[in-house]
């Protein structure tokens, strides 16, 4: 089968190559991949010189089941699915039931491919915040993949959404997704917030933490700034209504990993029905992978990049 593999001599450090097809275990379905979406973290890892050549990256992929799991678990042959895992940038992918969800047959595979990492991360962090009804929730990196899903899901949960985006051109779009406020940086937010989903790190995390009210929590989901987090000496003081604040780390595939099948199915259905906007800002055939990588690493995208396997 064909796959995108790490090749440090090629543009974007990726190249199309022939690799062995996966051999699914008894609990895995074999999926013919139709579209994949790119995440900053996996692309950043792929271009690192330390990443071995021949590695097949890819967390997010959508397609059709061509061979159901031998043990009878999961979807049947012919069902459209959205999948999460490793080595997804390939024509075929073996996936256990816990890491795939079903989708309507007429759903756009490109839109579905944006769901796994971005949609699940946003959904699970917001759930950990508890009831959001009437609470002020800040989302940094709001115009990115996780951020866009977080803005929409938080708004639907009744939160007063405070979106952070450096690009003023994103303001109207974020308001259309449900943001009540849009600011260029956390330091510009005038009133305290109850919770933060931070996708940026660095000074954004420091300033977002300072914006928390008593008992507030900040979830560190992404580090797109690649900057160090340096807290000033008074950042952890609890006086003046700043007590009991916390910073929590987040990893989607925890130990043990959750069964994401129901959540993936729900997110896929909402996206297919148009109730969630996948925010695709770049799309093309996978032969144009170098363009997508350069746009993503160059921070020229606000939303998701999708490659169609054509």
Image: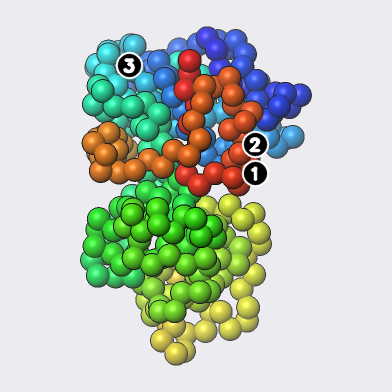
Q: Residue at x 50, y 70 (%)?
A: 186
Front residue of this view, candidates 44 and 245 = 44
Task: Give residue 27's position: percent from left, percent from top.
Answer: 33, 20
Asked if the residue at tag 2 contacts the one at tag 1, i.e. Cβ–Cβ closer than 8 Å, the answer is yes
Camera-nearest label, 1 or 3: 1
Task: Give residue 71's position: percent from left, percent from top.
Answer: 27, 16
Q: Quarter of the image holding residue 234?
A: bottom right
Mark 2 nearby-residue class (10 Å; few <14, some 14–19, many ≥20):
some
Judge whether 68 appears above or below 275 on screen.
Answer: above
Q: Residue at x 24, y 62 (%)?
A: 158
Q: Of the numbered discs in the image, which one, if any, rests on residue 65?
A: 3
Front residue of this view, candidates 279 and 105 = 279
Judge whether 127 appears above or below 180 on screen.
Answer: above
Cα separation, mark 3 vs mark 2, equals: 31 Å
Mark 3: secondary structure? strand
Write down the residue under mark 2: 294
Front residue of this view, candidates 198 and 85 = 198
Left or right of residue 152, residue 245 in this image: right
Task: Give residue 15's position: percent from left, percent from top.
Answer: 65, 20
Q: Residue at x 56, y 70 (%)?
A: 206
Q: Tell me which label, 3 or 2, sits earlier in the chain.
A: 3
Cα separation, mark 1 vs mark 3, equals: 35 Å
Q: Of the numbered discs in the image, which one, if any, rests on residue 171?
A: none
Q: Tell me which label, 1 or 3, sits earlier in the chain.
A: 3
Write down the residue under mark 1: 298
Q: Quarter of the image holding residue 110?
A: top left
Mark 1: secondary structure? loop
Judge whether 306 appears above or below 138 on screen.
Answer: above
Asked if the residue at tag 2 contacts the one at tag 3, i.e. Cβ–Cβ closer than 8 Å, the answer is no
């Amino acid at each position: 089968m064909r796959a995108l593999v790490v090749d440090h001599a090629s543009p974007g450090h990726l190249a199309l190559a022939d690799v062995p097809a996966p051999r699914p275990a008894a609990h895995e379905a074999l999926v013919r991949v139709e579209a994949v979406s790119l995440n900053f973290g996996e692309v950043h890892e792929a271009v690192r010189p330390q990443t071995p050549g021949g590695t097949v990256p890819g967390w997010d992929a959508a397609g059709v089941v061509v061979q159901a799991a031998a043990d009878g678990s999961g979807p049947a042959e012919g069902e459209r699915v959205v999948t999460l895992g490793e080595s997804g940038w390939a024509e075929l992918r073996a996936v256990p039931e816990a890491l795939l969800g079903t989708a309507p047959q007429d759903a756009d595979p490109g839109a579905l491919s944006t769901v796994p990492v971005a949609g699940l991360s946003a959904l699970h962090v917001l759930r950990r915040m508890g009831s959001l009804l009437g609470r002020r929730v800040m989302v940094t990196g709001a115009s990115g993949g996780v951020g866009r899903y977080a803005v929409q899901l938080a708004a639907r949960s009744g939160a007063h959404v405070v979106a952070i985006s450096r690009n003023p051109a994103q303001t109207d779009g974020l308001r259309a997704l449900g943001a009540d406020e849009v600011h260029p940086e956390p330091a510009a937010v005038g009133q305290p917030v109850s919770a933060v989903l931070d996708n940026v790190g660095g000074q954004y995390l420091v300033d977002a933490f300072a914006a928390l009210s008593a008992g507030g929590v900040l979830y560190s989901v992404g580090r797109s700034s690649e900057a160090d987090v340096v807290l000033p000496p008074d950042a952890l003081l609890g006086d003046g209504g700043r007590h009991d604040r916390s910073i929590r780390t987040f990893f989607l595939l925890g130990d043990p990993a959750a069964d994401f099948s129901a959540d993936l199915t729900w997110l896929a259905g909402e996206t297919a029905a148009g109730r969630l906007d996948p925010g695709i800002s770049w799309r093309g055939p996978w032969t144009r992978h170098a363009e997508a990588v350069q746009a993503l690493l160059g921070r020229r995208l606000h939303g998701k990049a999708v490659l169609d396997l054509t």
